[in-house]
Amino acid sequence: MRVKNSVTTHARRKKILKRAKGYFGSKHLLFKTAKEQVLRSLRYSYIDRKNLKSDYRKLWIKRINAQCRLNDISYSRFINGLNKAGVKVNRKMLAELAINDPKAFAELVKVAKKAK
């Protein structure tokens, strides 16, 4: 007696087509095109999860730089001054301080300027 895989095959195809729900044209109707698009979409989502980290870092740097300029120091001199002073604060926290607590940020700028 031979083994038939219709149940397994149907389930596998159904899973792919379910993921392709909402895609344009035949990409949500036909198995072959749906599979191609789902694989491509998964690749895009993986890449964009990595890019999101980079985008946030860029945003934090812009916010820190804007606040640094208001305190008469460049971003690079500020970060260099903090490193020389031994202050270990990441850019995410520095950006939060720059937005929510400019006075505390100004104190860090003073520390960075002294460390030059």
Image (cartoon, rainbow, N blue to C red):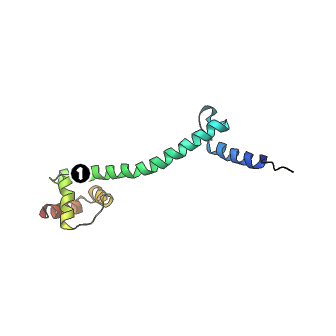
Residue underneath mark 1: 65
Counting other residues with Cα less than 10 Å from the Cα at mark 1, is it few (<14), some (14-19), or many (20 or more)? many
Q: Is residue 40 above or below residue 74?
A: above
Tell which residue pokes out farthest to the front in this image: 1
Q: Residue, x 19% and y 57% (percent of image)?
A: 78
Q: How many circles with numbers are drawn on the protein?
A: 1
Q: Position of residue 32 (x, y in %)?
A: 65, 37
Q: Nearer the viewer, residue 93 or 1?
A: 1
Label 1 element class: helix
Tell which residue pokes out farthest to the bottom in this image: 86
Q: Position of residue 41 (x, y in %)?
A: 54, 43
Q: Quadrant of the rendered structure where residue 17 is?
A: top right
Q: Is residue 114 above or below residue 52?
A: below
Does residue 92 appear to the left or right of 112 in the view shown? right
Q: Position of residue 74 (x, y in %)?
A: 18, 52
Question: Which amino acid, by three-letter code, is at mark 1?
Answer: Asn
Q: Quadrant of the rendered structure where residue 98 is?
A: bottom left
Quadrant occupied by the C terminus: bottom left
Q: Residue, x 17% and y 64% (percent of image)?
A: 111
Q: Position of residue 81 (x, y in %)?
A: 17, 61
